[in-house]
Image: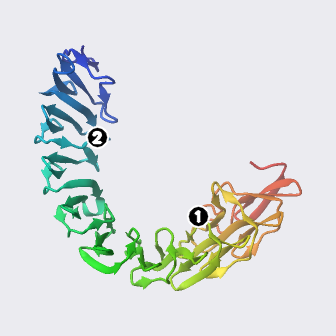
Amino acid sequence: MRVWFDGKLGPAYTSIAKDHPVLSNEGGRFAYDGCQGPWEGGRHYAVVDGVPGPDFDALRGPEFSADGKHVWYLGWRGEKVVPVIDGVPGPEYDAVDPVGFHDGDHVVYRACLGAKWVAVIDGVAGPEYSFVESIALLPELHGFSYLARMGEGELLVINGRPQPVYDEIGTAVPCVSATGRTVYNAKKGERWVMVTDGVEGPEWDDLGAPFFSPEGELCYCGRRGDKWVAVAGEFVGPELDMVNGPVITSQGRAVYWGKDGDKWAVGVGETIGRGYDEVHYGSPTVSARGSVAFIVRRGEKWLVWLDGQESSAYDDFAYIGKSYALGFSDDGSHLAYAVKRADKWVVVTDGRESPEYEGVSVPLPLFLRGQTGPTYACTVGGKSRMVINGQPGPEYEGVW
């Protein structure tokens, strides 16, 4: 059997792997596993761009990187496996996880020799550990991290530097800020700490996943006893029975929501609203100016909580796709939403209600680019019209 590709005939083999040759996504390259002799017990060759590599007892691959610049495969000789990257054989190991290419040029894999595992990044093997996993590219640091086990403990290795050993690492991939700060959560005994640039923070009974805000503030939720709080930089929020979702920031203020007894609470910095029966899953919405809007329910009525101020109560909200129809203008200075009262619909813009409609449809974002008024379709008296930038257009039999 031979492979004919682009006018050229390749070497002859007894058999070629099923579904081979494989083609690169880019670059017009090809590769396949060709075998001389019986498939089991014969000699296998990875043929890349028509050129055979060294012989092995068996192969896994070849496979190309997404950009087609690199190719890898694993070759077995007896019980040992050899990773071959771009035609260059690596050391023999007892096991090798599939090779990954990151950011076009970085080649990573983990390998086992005896009872020890190593992370191999760009051909350089790291220290030996009981186990290695979660090798991840950290673009902000121009490097990699991975989670390692050492005896009964765990640690992160960040850019080749082993971090302290803890009983458990909660964040397998550290969070990295735009300026290169790193943070992850770790367990010491029965307590948890945030470790920021190698420095431990205060102890907690439990911790949520950390991240950095656009302003560079470290944000997370932490529990002491039965109560959770939102933390953003130096700000520590009120005690709640649960803090839902990640803590985010707006103009340096913490934005958070969670359970408060059998009710829900929403907050922006020191300003908190309590006593709600539900917080819409799409909340909050943050404007370009830092205003924060939550959609909340009290009893059977829905309302908008905007920077601590409640709107009038309504029976329902219109939808944009699967989300409620609420949005800010591009410059963040205007807020609009479409709501129902009894059997009529209105669109509320900056607290002012439109005329009542029999129906409202919002197929697009409420504010189109550069506009200060909402855009939507409405129905009155069986006639339909478009309202564009807050201005009603002519009537039609229907608008689609």
Q: Mark 1, residues whose alpha carbon is within 10 Å: few (<14), some, or many (≥20)?
A: few
Identify the secondary structure beneath mark 2: loop
Relative image position of residue 220 (x, y in whole percent): 41, 73
Relative image position of residue 123 (x, y in whole percent): 14, 48
Q: Nearer the viewer, residue 399 or 272?
A: 272
Instruction: Give the side of residue 313 with respect to residue 381, left or right.
Output: left
User: Compared to 190, does 100 lie above or below?
Assistant: above
Residue drawn at x 83%, y 59% is: 358
- Quadrant assignment for the N terminus: top left
Q: Quadrant of residue 22?
A: top left
Q: Looking at numbered disc 2 in the image, what kind of residue is underneath it? A: Ser
- What's the distance in space between the residues labelled 2 and 1, CA to CA? 38 Å
The disc, 2 or 1, on the residue closer to the chain's N-terminal end is 2
- The residue indicated by pointer 1 is 281
Residue drawn at x 41%, y 76% is: 222
Residue drawn at x 28%, y 56% is: 137
Q: Residue furthest left?
A: 91
User: Compared to 83, does 206 lie above or below?
Assistant: below
Can residue 23 be seen here? The reply is yes
Q: Quadrant of residue 305?
A: bottom right
- The residue indicated by pointer 2 is 65
